[in-house]
Image (spheres, rainbow, N blue to C red):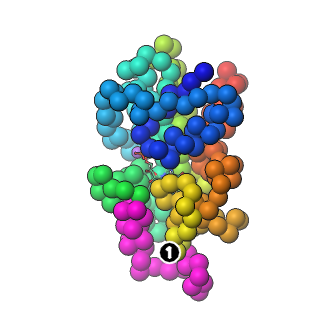
Amino acid sequence: NIVIVATKNKGKVKEFAHAFAALGLEVRSMFDYPELPDIVEDGTTFAENAFKKAKTVADALGVPVLADDSGLCVDRLDGAPGVYSARYAGEGATDADNNAKLLRELSELQLGEDTEQPLLSTARFVCSLALYDPATEHIWTAEGAVEGWITATPSGAGGFGYDPLFYLPNEQQTMANLTIEQKQAISHRGEALRKLIASLQAG
Ligand code: ITT
Ligand code: NA
C-alpha cells in the first residue's frame, strides 16, 4: 500500500517514508509524479497551504493525498519566517542560505551569558498536515509544534532545514543532532502525524 505526499522536500520525504514504513506503507512524493503542475503557496497560514497542496495534487491524480506545510516561528522576529520558511532568503534559497539569513537577522541579539551555546530567541517549529480525499471531498487535518531556542552555533548533520540552529533545552542538543527516531518522537511533524493517524482510526 502507498501513501502519496504532495511534497518536493527531500527531508520531509525521508521522515514520512520512515514513519509510514512502520505501518507497512510506502511513500510516493512529487518526485514520482513529475508531470504535476507547480503549486502556488499563497496561503497566510500553514493549514491553508497544507490544504491547498493536498487538494491540488489529489484532484490531479484522483486519489487521496497527504500534504505538509511547516515552518519555523521565531519570537524575537515576531513569528518570522513562519509560512515563508522555505524561501526566507529569497526564491530558490537553499537551507544554508535560509540559516545564514536567520542568524543575520538575529545577530545583534543575544540572551544570557553562555558563550558556548549563545541562545538568540525562543522559537517553535509548526507542522500542519492535510489529507484530502477527492472522491468524498473529505479533509482530515492535524497540527503539531515543538518549542526550542535558536542557537548562534549550528550543530549536527541530521534532519534538514533549520534543524542545526534549533536547540532543544531538554535534550541539550540541536534537532540536527537527533536520530530520525528521536526527531520523530518530539518533532512538530511527528506530533501532527500521530494526531492525524489517531483521527483516521477514530473514523
Ligand atoms: P513542499 O512545499 O514541497 O512540501 P517546502 O520545503 O517548500 O516543501 P514548506 O513550504 O512547508 O515546504 O516549508 C517548510 C520549510 O520550513 C522547510 O523548507 C524548512 O526550511 C522549514 N522546516 C519545516 N520542517 C522542518 C524541520 O522538521 N526541520 C527543519 N526545518 C523545517
Ligand atoms: Na509553505
Q: Residue at 43% across / 16% down in the picture?
A: 62
Rendered location of residue 16, percent (x, y): 57, 39
**In this view, 145 is above or below 107:** above
Q: Which residue has dot 1 on it? A: 152
Number of numbered markers: 1
Residue plotted at (37% across, 56% down): 94
Q: Residues within 10 Å of mark 1 (few under 14, many from 20)?
A: many
Residue range in magenta is: 96-121
User: Which residue is nearer to you in this view: 102 or 43?
Assistant: 102
Query: Residue 39 location in percent, x, y?
Result: 33, 35
Tell me if residue 178 comes above or below residue 203 in the rendering.
below
Q: Quadrant of ligand 2?
A: top left
Amino acid type for the residue under numbered disc 1: Ala
Q: In which image quadrant can residue 112 be found?
A: bottom right
Question: 37 or 27, which lies in front?
Answer: 27
Is residue 137 inside the magenta stretch?
A: no
Name which residue lies at 59% across and 78% down: 117
